[in-house]
Image (cartoon, helix red, strand yellow):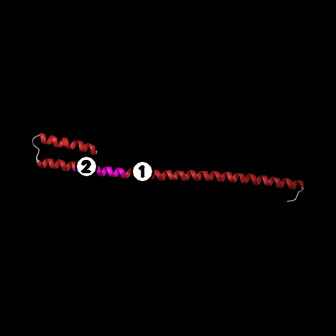
Amino acid sequence: MYSLIRGLLPIVVGVTMLGGCATTEAVNRAQATADSARATADQAVAAAQSALQRADQANAAAQQAQQAANSAQQAARDAAETADRARQDAEAASQRTTTRLARGERG
């Protein structure tokens, strides 16, 4: 948008002057219009840059959340494996105790 305005201003001013009917007032109005358009374009660029910054921040937060979720999922897997091993150990101990009692051994 900015480059479009920048490129059109000299053309508008030149055509107006070549037409032979350009008054100082017309040129000043054209310049004021171009200045206003440039200010609007500058504001739009600033808003776009701000939006891009916020999007980058949101993306970083999302990545951190994903990493936390991945860590939590791994911790849950590890806990499940530990619980399974403990269950297996408890079953094995129970079977050994049952076998000893069946043989008449004491504690």
- What residue does disc 2 label? 38
**Element marked by disc 1:** helix
Q: CA distance from mark 1 to mark 2?
A: 25 Å
Helix, strand or loop: magenta stretch: helix
Q: Residues within 10 Å of mark 1 (few under 14, many from 20)?
A: few
Left or right: where 57 falls relative to 43 = right
Left or right: 96 as drawn, with respect to 37: right
Q: In front here: 91 or 44?
A: 44
Question: Residue, x 12% and y 40% (percent of image)?
Answer: 18
Crowdedness of circle 2 by 10 Å Cα count: few (<14), some, many (20+)?
Answer: some
Label 2: which secondary element: helix
Q: Residue 30's spot in the image, x, y percent?
A: 17, 47
Q: Position of residue 58 (x, y in %)?
A: 45, 52
Quadrant that contains the C terminus: bottom right
Residue denoted by label 1: 55
Numbered marks: total: 2
Is residue 61 within the magenta segment? no
**From which residue to which does the magenta span run?**
35-49
Q: Residue at x 24, y 44 (%)?
A: 6
